[in-house]
Amino acid sequence: MEKNPKIAIYPGSFDPLTNGHVDIIERALKIFDKVIVSVMHNPKKSSLFSVQERVDMIRDSIGKKANLEVDSFDGLLVDYTRMKNAVAIIRGMRAISDFENEFQMALMNRRLNRDVQTIFLMTGLRWIFTSSSIIKEVATFGGDITGMVPQPIKLKMLEKFPARKEN
Ligand code: PNS
């Protein structure tokens, strides 16, 4: 690792991790010396999995990589970026619908800490329609989520919501 490694935080609810998130992680790893995927609390959302479950599920899904850390934090994202000496916050952008909320968060984070830059990575076209919420909705009604989430996530989801017989 370099003397002054460029560290990026990829924060999110990850409830659960999707293949869209994995795509963003892989892209971020190509740009930064180290990426920290951090499960954080979004006060606008209630979660299906506990923070520890989400951390474990991410670790099971992406395996061990020297330049990747999986962590969690309960507090302000800008405080966490300072604590971790991060230079960037990574966010995935899917469509125009994501823009308003992301723009607001990025500007607020910039106001709170000018030393960290928010960097948006475009989600791959294949994942443009996937989100943790829609995947949870499909799984709740026993729908097949194969190919939308890593296999360990699919198995955890099946423990909560058994699949319909035809899946
Ligand atoms: O995956 P999500 O739910 O879109 O992620 C949103 C998240 C968790 C990154 C955001 O809610 C957050 O940063 N939470 C930590 C508390 C905080 O710093 N809030 C102010 C953001 S401007």
Image (tube, grey):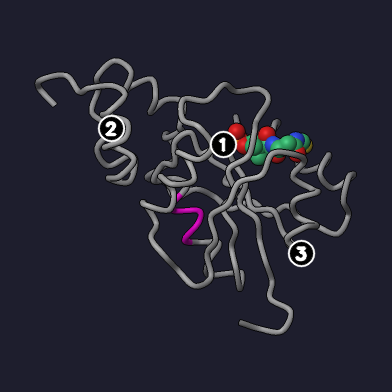
Write the residue at 14% across / 26% down: 167
Quarter in which the N terminus is drawn: bottom right
Mark pair 3, 2: CA separation:
37 Å
From the image, give the main secondary structure of the stretch colored magenta. helix
Is the residue at mark 2 in contact range of ligand 1, meaning its CB lies under 8 Å from it?
A: no
The amino acid marked with disc number 2 is Ile
Q: Which residue is mark 3?
A: 85
Q: Which residues are magenta?
A: 22-26
Q: Nearer the viewer, mark 1 or mark 2?
A: 1
Membership of 24 in magenta stretch: yes
Tell me the CA gap for discs 1 and 3.
Answer: 21 Å
Tell me, for residue 13, which label it has, or none.
Answer: 1
Q: Earlier in the sequence, mark 1 or mark 3?
A: 1
Please tell me whether mark 3 sits on a helix, a strand or a loop: loop
Nearest the eye: 160 or 25: 160
Q: Residue at x 68, y 54 (%)?
A: 119
First of labels 1, 2 by sequence position:
1
Q: Position of residue 97 (x, y in %)?
A: 60, 29
Residue bearing mark 2:
145
Q: List x then y, in percent, for residue 157.
A: 32, 30
Task: Count all numbered tags in the image, as a single digit.
Answer: 3
Q: Residue at x 60, y 23 (%)?
A: 45
Q: Considering only vertical position in the picture, is 66 above or below 70?
A: below
Residues packed near mark 1 inside 10 Å, few (<14), some (14 to 19) or many (20 plus): many
Q: Label 2: state its secondary structure.
A: loop
Disc 1 residue type?
Answer: Ser
